[in-house]
Image: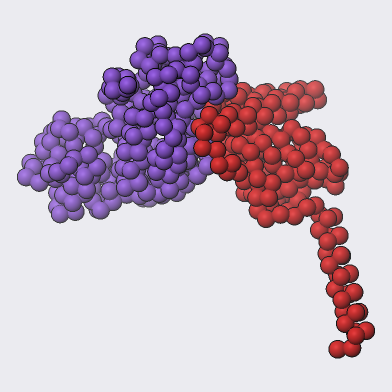
Chain colours: A red, B purple
């Protein structure tokens, strides 16, 4: 292969890689364990593990085009709520809070941004481990309460009541 | 809970009704080698009785007598929950409990009747624990956050150790007892064993929503469990399937299941009064 062909080949390869990177950036940061990205372009979030890829709604803050701060991420399928996360997102990913798995229970704690699953902090001290869970449920309860208040402001009494009860349920989970 | 009317097993009277009851209980505890609950005490049933007895008898004798130790173990805390086999009627007396857990371990079941669990066990309360072990925080100051105990007697009797699938910090005799519980769960319910985790044992703090009551976790004699990383929902009147399978194992080691609390707490197991009483006498 001549030198000019090699240079052209390298340039084309570089251009292709740049294009792929641009496409990935347009869809949001990537990472293992996530099911892609969802949400409106001004407020994207990573689809958490075991959440359906569609029917997702984030009720919370946004920053720099990504979901950020305290809120509730709800996933619907067939008109039913199939998963919910109550707590904090950071740069569009689960950070601290509680995933509600209907007909199973709660998955709580701090979440690994790469996998979207509860991270193993290696906390062997029971007090520290439990304090992390307490903090997660506190965040979750606060998120549910804020959503309840938002529904109340829009006159949706039924939803306001539902999330108020959810806030109480999350607050009392841990002894 | 039905009672056997006569002995079952090696050299026993082996009334078919009694044998079938023992077979159902063995199947409910994961001893699938029994085969069918057919009321016939054959080699498989005898072998299953011996295997079950190995969990608590140094020399299994393959026999279960009414009111005897083996019967008390086998019948303790049995919820009576069985899975209906396809094509059978709920009125059928020959329903066979699953030999192995089938389906999701976290699927919710109705909370068992409190009178059918923790049989022979009494729960503790704050006053009882304070009398036996004293204040975990000698100067008070309990908050909603976990703190390490400052009570010198408690502190010198705490240990961080592995109890099978996870590590916990708790009162030494409680941790030792948990090791025995987990060893039995590993044998009798291996699928559940592999799925178990903990939401914590020792935690000195106030009970949720209270300004005066201390959590039973404060003395390192209570533990909350997860199944496949999932916490059972507090107070919804339902408990995860896996917890119903291991509650009888906890019960025969003297641990009280929180599913029986006025507000159901299915993830919670704590030392019963008898255990606490014994440990308090043993502690230095």
Q: Is residue A14 left or right of residue B13?
A: right
Q: Is residue A68 left or right of residue B261?
A: right
Q: Is residue A135 left or right of residue A1?
A: left
Q: Residue at x 59, y 36 (%)?
A: A108
Name the image quarter holding residue B278: top left
Q: Residue at x 78, y 52 (%)?
A: A29
Q: Residue at x 45, y 32 (%)?
A: B169
Q: Is residue B222 above or below residue B249?
A: above
Q: Residue at x 42, y 38 (%)?
A: B161
Name the image quarter holding residue A32: bottom right
The residue lying toward the viewer, choosing from A127 and A146, is A127
Q: Is residue A88 left or right of residue B33?
A: right
User: Residue A50: where, in percent of width, then height?
Assistant: 62, 49
User: Residue B112: where, in percent of width, then height?
Assistant: 38, 30
User: Residue A58: where, in percent of width, then height?
Assistant: 75, 39
The residue lying toward the viewer, choosing from B138 and A117, is B138
Residue B187 visible to the viewer: yes
The residue lying toward the viewer, choosing from A166 and B21, is A166
Residue B240 visible to the viewer: no
């Amino acid at each position: 292969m001549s030198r000019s062909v090699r240079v052209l080949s390298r340039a084309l390869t570089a251009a292709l890689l740049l294009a792929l990177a641009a496409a990935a950036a347009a869809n949001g940061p990537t990472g293992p364990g996530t099911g892609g990205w969802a949400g409106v372009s001004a407020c994207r979030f990573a689809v958490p593990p075991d959440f359906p890829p569609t029917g997702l709604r984030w009720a919370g803050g946004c920053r720099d085009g990504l979901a950020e701060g305290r809120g509730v991420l709800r996933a619907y399928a067939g008109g039913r709520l199939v998963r919910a996360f109550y707590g904090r997102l950071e740069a569009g990913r689960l950070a601290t809070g509680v995933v509600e798995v209907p007909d199973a229970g709660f998955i709580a704690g701090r979440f690994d941004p790469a996998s979207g699953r509860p991270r193993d902090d290696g906390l062997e001290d029971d007090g520290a481990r439990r304090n992390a869970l307490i903090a997660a449920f506190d965040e979750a309860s606060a998120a549910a309460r804020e959503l309840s208040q938002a529904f109340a402001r829009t006159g949706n009494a039924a939803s306001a009541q539902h999330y108020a009860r959810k806030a109480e349920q999350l607050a009392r989970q841990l002894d | 809970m039905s009672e056997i009317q006569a002995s079952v097993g090696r050299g026993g009277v082996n009334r078919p009704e009694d044998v079938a009851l023992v077979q159902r209980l063995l199947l409910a505890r994961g001893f699938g080698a029994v085969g069918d609950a057919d009321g016939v005490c054959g080699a498989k049933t005898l072998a299953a009785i011996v295997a079950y007895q190995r969990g608590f008898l140094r020399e299994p004798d393959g026999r279960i007598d009414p009111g005897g130790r083996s019967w008390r173990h086998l019948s303790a805390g049995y919820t009576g929950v069985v899975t209906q086999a396809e094509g059978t009627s709920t009125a059928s007396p020959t329903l066979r409990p699953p030999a192995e857990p089938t389906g999701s371990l976290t699927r919710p079941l109705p909370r068992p009747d409190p009178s059918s669990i923790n049989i022979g066990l009494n729960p503790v309360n704050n006053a009882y624990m304070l009398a036996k072990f004293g204040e975990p925080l000698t100067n008070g100051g309990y908050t909603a956050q976990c703190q390490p105990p400052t009570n010198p007697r408690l502190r010198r009797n705490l240990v961080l150790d592995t109890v099978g699938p996870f590590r916990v910090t708790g009162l030494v005799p409680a941790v030792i007892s948990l090791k025995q519980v987990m060893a039995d769960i590993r044998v009798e319910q291996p699928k559940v064993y592999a799925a178990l985790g903990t939401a914590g044992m020792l935690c000195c703090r106030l009970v949720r929503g209270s300004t005066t009551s201390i959590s039973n976790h404060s003395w390192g004699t209570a533990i909350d469990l997860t199944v496949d990383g999932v916490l059972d929902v507090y107070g919804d009147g339902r408990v995860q399937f896996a917890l119903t399978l291991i509650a009888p194992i906890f019960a025969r080691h003297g641990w009280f299941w929180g599913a029986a609390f006025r507000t159901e707490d299915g993830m919670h197991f704590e030392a019963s009064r008898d255990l606490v009483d014994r440990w308090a006498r043993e502690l230095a």
